[in-house]
Amino acid sequence: MSFTRKILILSFLLVLLNFSFLHIVSAEENQRGDLTREEIIIEAQRSLDRSLSIFNIVATFVSVMVTILAIIIGIAGAAGFFKYKEWKAVIQEMERDLKQVKEVARDAEREAKEAARDAKREADTITQIRNEAEEDLNALRSGLGDLPTISLTEKPSEEDMEKLDEFIRKFDVFETLGASLKAKDYITRGIAFYYRDKYYSALESFEKAIELKLDDANAWVLKGAMLEKLGRSEEALESLKKAIELKPDDANAWVLKGAMLEKLGRSEEALESLKKAIELKPDDANVWYNKGVVLDKLGQSKEALEAYKKAIELKPDYAEAWFNKGVVLDKLGQSKEALEAYKKAIELKPDYAEAWSNKGVVLDKLGQSKEALEAYKKAIELKPDYADAWVNKGTALDRLSRGKEALESLEKAIELKPDYALAWTGKGVALGRLGRYDEALEAYKKAIELKPDLAEAWFNKGVMLDRLGRYDEALESLEKAIELKPDDAEAWTGKGVVLGKLGRSEEALEAYERAIELKPDDADAWYNKGVALDKLGRSEEALEAFKKAIELKPDLAEAWALKGAMLDRLGRSEEALESFKKAIELRPDLAVAWALKGAVLERLGRSEEALESFKKAIELRPDYADAWFNRACLYALKGERENALADLRRAVELDSSFKEEAKKDKDFEALWDDEEFRKLVA
């Protein structure tokens, strides 16, 4: 290959490289969006000029070389150094190469000019697309209006959500087309991702916003909110501190800082942050709401209630504030007011499953178990995987004596949340109602294993051990429940019951008095206090305790029955009979009322009526030793030896202490010398 041809090829390649550069620049601009149309065209022209300069240099060089060589050949030929014809052939070949170089140069110039025109057209197109993208972006920004600030409790309206979703869809297009995206655009995208529960994507957007604008306090606040959602509370706190450092008067940053501190168990510091937020923004309902949450966590229920009231005053349609107001009112024992708060929350937000469930809890406390059950069903309909609602439904069904259904609900709660100690406790209660005591005890043990500080599980375990006759163990469980929750009146009452069964009546009385001190309107505590006073021989005081129990709970049949027993003991037999009559009216299946009535009728000489009462008591409770013994006494007085001995035999089988009782009771005096009687009581 000749030297000139090599030069020609090299030059042509340089031109091609420069043409390629024109398209590379255009492509790069398309991706980066940081070169203007004019810059692209100028760069293309420079590339073209470089290419043509190279060709001109090459062509000139070749032309000069041909001329010089022709002169040299002419001189050399004249001198006779070589043959002229041979050199002339070389010169002709070089002239042909030079002609080719010039032709290629002309072609390259045409190609370069065409490439420059293409680059200009592409630059114009890119500029137009970018301008259109900018217009679309500005229009979209304008259409968004005032974007919602991220709230940890409320989502934006559906209209706002649609705007945010549209922004997400178009954002990638804008980015690809090189639209001039700003920090606030990344913030907008982050907010959209947040409300779609895409927290990692939201975090990336807020971090990009910070990268573009390091001193954007709002971006730092939002980054903190995302980190909190991702469970990175310590990092979230640092991000919020940075936001406050940049903008100390940013109320939202102080609110979120308070929320982070609360998550980290630093409630006192959280409260201080929220106080600062209120100082900066006293008319912000969300700030007052969050203050209420922290105060409630600190056990300051009354102060929390005032905070929720303030939030509602500022924002009457704030469903979550109404809900939390209900929670606090319930804690303060104001069940009716709590019910109204939950109703309002539901009115504002009909699909509020938690409000429906809590409404049911309050209805249950108000004795409206059927209505409570309907509320729980609604909560489950709205949120089928809501374990709390399944537990509450089970509890309501249990109160309605629908044990099997109750157990099914509680097992569903456990299926949804196997480590839910409260569900295991509820399952134990349901099993107990069904008479499956050993299984119930195991359920309580499981609850305690999952949550050793669950006082309710310890209490119910104690009750179950009591039913199983394991009184010492029952007492230990009840004392543990009281240790965990010293103000639980029901646990003190349970402790008193067990102490009474252990023959420790004085201690039992102290336990009941403590229960009454904690809950003066606890009818069961007053009833059991009466039982303890009766065992201590303090009949008049016992009578007053039973009267108080009836005053608090007029349908407490057991209290009416024992009130009658005290009246009888105090010689007021007719009043006693009226009390027994009321007890039986309330509970026709109450064997003790029938037996006590029979004993009074016997003393009043109304033998036939007494026999009917004892018969009814025994029918209702075949293992009722006292009823068998009292009827034996009556038969003995009537001279019905066989019936008397048969009933006494059954009483002794059930309770051997009646052997000694029969030896002393003068009702059996006519049988004391009877050989069969003697054998029976020996």
Image (tube, grey):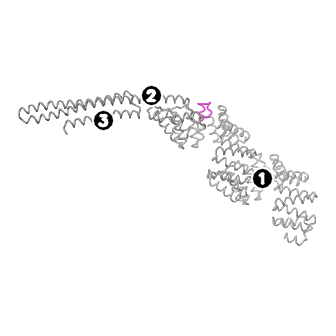
Q: Earlier in the sequence, mark 2 or mark 1?
A: 2
Magenta residues?
274-286
Q: Please determine whether, in this image, residue 550 is positioned above or below residue 68.
A: below
Q: Is residue 399 above or below residue 60?
A: below
Q: Residues under labels 2 and 3: Cα distance?
A: 30 Å
| Residue 115, placed above or below residue 450 | above
Q: Are marks 2 and 3 in contact (CB under 8 Å)?
A: no
Dot 3 or dot 1: first in sequence order is 3
Q: Nearer the viewer, mark 2 or mark 1?
A: 2
Can you give x and y, in whole percent of width and height, for residue 526 in the image? 79, 49
Q: What residue is shown at x 89% (from left), y 59% (from top)?
A: 612
Residue 344 lies in the magenta stretch:
no
Residue 122 in the image, given as x and y percentages of width and height:
38, 30
Residue 413, x across and y down, in percent: 65, 50
- The majority secondary structure of the magenta stretch comes to helix
In the rendered structure, which disc, 2 or 3, sits on the residue that comes first in sequence? Answer: 3
Instruction: Tell me the tag on residue 444.
Output: none
Q: Is residue 541 visible?
A: no
- Which label sits on residue 509? 1
For disc 3, the marked residue is: 17
In the image, taking residue 177 as reference, residue 294 lies left or right, namely right
Residue placed most toward the observer, 118 or 333: 118
> Which one is closest to the eye, mark 3 or mark 1?
3
Name the image quarter holding residue 273.
Answer: top right
